[in-house]
Amino acid sequence: MKKIIAAEHIVKVYGQGGERRKVLDGVSVSINEGEFVSVMGPSGSGKSTLLFAVSGMDTVDGGRVFFDGRELGVLQENELADLRRRRMGFVFQQPTLLKNMNLLDNIILPAMRDHRKNVKKITERARTLMKKTGIEGLEKRDITQVSGGQLQRAGICRALLGSPQILFGDEPTGALNQEAAEGIMSLFAEINEAGTAVMLVTHDARIAAKTERILFMCDGQIVSEMRLPKFRETVLEERMEQVVLRMRELGI
């Protein structure tokens, strides 16, 4: 299977002088096309830093990161921005939506740079995604008039508008109740089933258990990895137990 991301011995350091700390300490990892990956570990272990590093959202202080064979560290910022916009999607714990725009306009706004001459086409795709994600009929709603789960679904629509090769999620269910979180994870599973790779950062064993590959981090390093078969709801509790047991064994 083709590698979409390859990180080689990457290092990220925060702080200055005697306060310098390696948040990523020589991490090497690859993600293949169509994989469903989660990253777990305690706060400060480097989970989100890893996600930001391999997606080109942040630079590294050592090592190299490749996306589909292209080394991110040698690209200009405008080239990186173009790569992220066209081939990656991002979903965060709190969707960054504008209060002075309705849901539909918030979804299509980032794509307008590439589709200024085809507003109708991109709007139709946005409406299709809203229907698929269960927020059809909310196009004209202000962001203060919908629930947290609906906002997150709008964020997912925006992330998928450009048909990315990989979707990155940094604690995408962290601010949601369990019912809303389950709905979001079902969406991620559908997205992955359609061929898009997914990489999620999470603290929640229930969320990680629904992915097919789990990277466990501690002190800036990947200390263990777990591979699981394709998820079925009937085995959720068993998979959760496996994840929790591995975390206990690792002391994280």
Image (cartoon, rainbow, N blue to C red):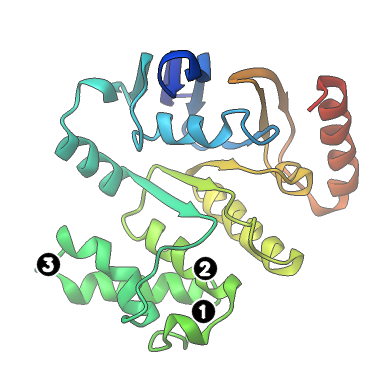
Give the residue drawn at x 23%, y 36%.
Answer: 80
Vertical placement of residue 223 versus 216, above or below: above
Give the structural element (helix, strand or loop) at label 2.
helix
Where is mark 3, residue-wise?
Answer: 116
Do the CB atoms of the residues marked 2 and 1 lie less than 8 Å apart? yes
Q: Is residue 10 visible?
A: yes
Three-letter code, disc 3: Arg
Where is mark 1, residue-wise?
Answer: 135
Where is mark 2, residue-wise?
Answer: 153
Give the residue drawn at x 39%, y 49%.
Answer: 89
Q: Nearer the viewer, residue 159 or 125?
A: 159
Give the structural element (helix, strand or loop) at label 1.
loop
Left or right of 35 in this view: 16 = left
Give the residue drawn at x 41%, y 63%.
Answer: 96
Residue 68 % position (x, y): 33, 27
Residue 46 falls in image quadrant:
top right
